[in-house]
Every structure is written in C-alpha cells, then in structure tokens.
C-alpha cells in the first residue's frame, strides 16, 4: 500500500508562513425549471445570435465607415459593395432583433396565455414580425449582391 498512495494523501509543497487555501471548484448550476431562468437564457441566446449574425465582432476589429454617399445621396444599403457599413450593421441587427422578438412572442403565446383571443393576437403579431423581418432581410441581401437596384 506504500507505493499506491491515494491522490488525497499526496501532500503538495507550500510556502512556509502562508496559509494554504482550501478551494473546491464546482461547476455552476443553472436551474432551468424556473421560468425566469429559462426566459433569461432564451433572450440572451437570441441577442448573442443576432450579434453574431450581423458581424458585430468584425465591426469591432475592422471599423467600417458610417455612411458612404453615392452622387450626394446617402443610402443605407449600398449595392455591389463587398464591405459592410455601420448603418447596414445597425439595420440588420434591428431586423434580426425584430425577428427574434417575433419568435419570442410566438413562443410565449402558446406557452403562457390561456385566452384564445389573446393567444391568437400575440401569435399573429409574432408571425407578422418574423415575416416582415424575413422579407426585409431578403430584400437587403438582394440589393447587396446586386440583383435589385443595379443601374
């Protein structure tokens, strides 16, 4: 048994005169049975997804221009340009957040609301927000790649 010591029996060297800390590391626990924790996790995941989809880190590392004017008329979405301007990033982020808000309304309407009229109202509003955001993002993408608006 001398040669086979347990890990707990091993003594680590320590600086004399200092108190040896007694740390115990444990993983943080998230209680997902609480609805507020679930909502907070859902919303933070949605915001993180929207930030990553709009190129937030790229805009921090490589600061884009705020607006570029073409023929003395500033536009939000510039066609046939391979760079993203700051205004485009803000518009796309807000559209992503609108879509995520619609998804949240859809989720909450079928989960919490008990009256059928209120449920159908919130469900319809969620679907409208998602549809508007999807169509707007598709339109902006088509402008950006030059399918629409190329003269």
Image (cartoon, helix red, strand yellow):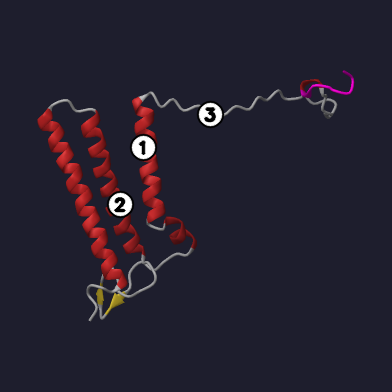
Majority secondary structure of magenta residues: loop
Q: Give the magenta range.
A: 1-7
- The residue under label 2 is 96
- Mark 1 or mark 2: whose residue is earlier in sequence: 1
Q: Where is residue 40 in the image (x, y as percent from the top left)?
A: 37, 34
Residue 28, disc: 3
Residue 50, visible in the rendered structure? yes
Let me know if residue 76 appears in the view: no
Q: Is residue 130 above or below residue 111?
A: below
Examine the structure image and report whether residue 56 is included in the region drawn in magenta.
Answer: no
Report whether 96 appears left or right of 129.
right
Q: In this view, does 144 lie above or below 34?
A: below
Which of 25/107 is in front?
A: 107
Query: Does 67 sit above or below residue 131?
Result: below
**Quarter occupied by the C terminus:** bottom left
Which residue lies most toward the left here? 117
């Amino acid at each position: 048994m001398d040669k086979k010591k347990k890990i707990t029996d091993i003594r680590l060297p320590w600086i004399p005169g200092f108190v040896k800390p007694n740390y115990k590391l444990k993983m943080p626990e998230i209680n997902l049975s609480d609805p507020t924790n679930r909502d907070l996790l859902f919303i933070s995941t949605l915001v993180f997804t929207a930030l990553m989809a709009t190129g937030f880190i790229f805009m921090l590392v490589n600061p884009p221009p705020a607006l570029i004017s073409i023929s003395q008329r500033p536009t939000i979405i510039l066609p046939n340009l391979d760079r993203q301007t700051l205004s485009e990033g803000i518009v796309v982020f807000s559209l992503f957040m609108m879509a995520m808000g619609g998804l949240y309304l859809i989720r909450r309407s079928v989960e919490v609301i008990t009256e059928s009229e209120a449920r159908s109202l919130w469900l319809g509003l969620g679907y409208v927000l998602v549809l508007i955001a999807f169509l707007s993002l598709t339109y902006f993408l088509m402008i950006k790649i030059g399918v629409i608006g190329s003269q």
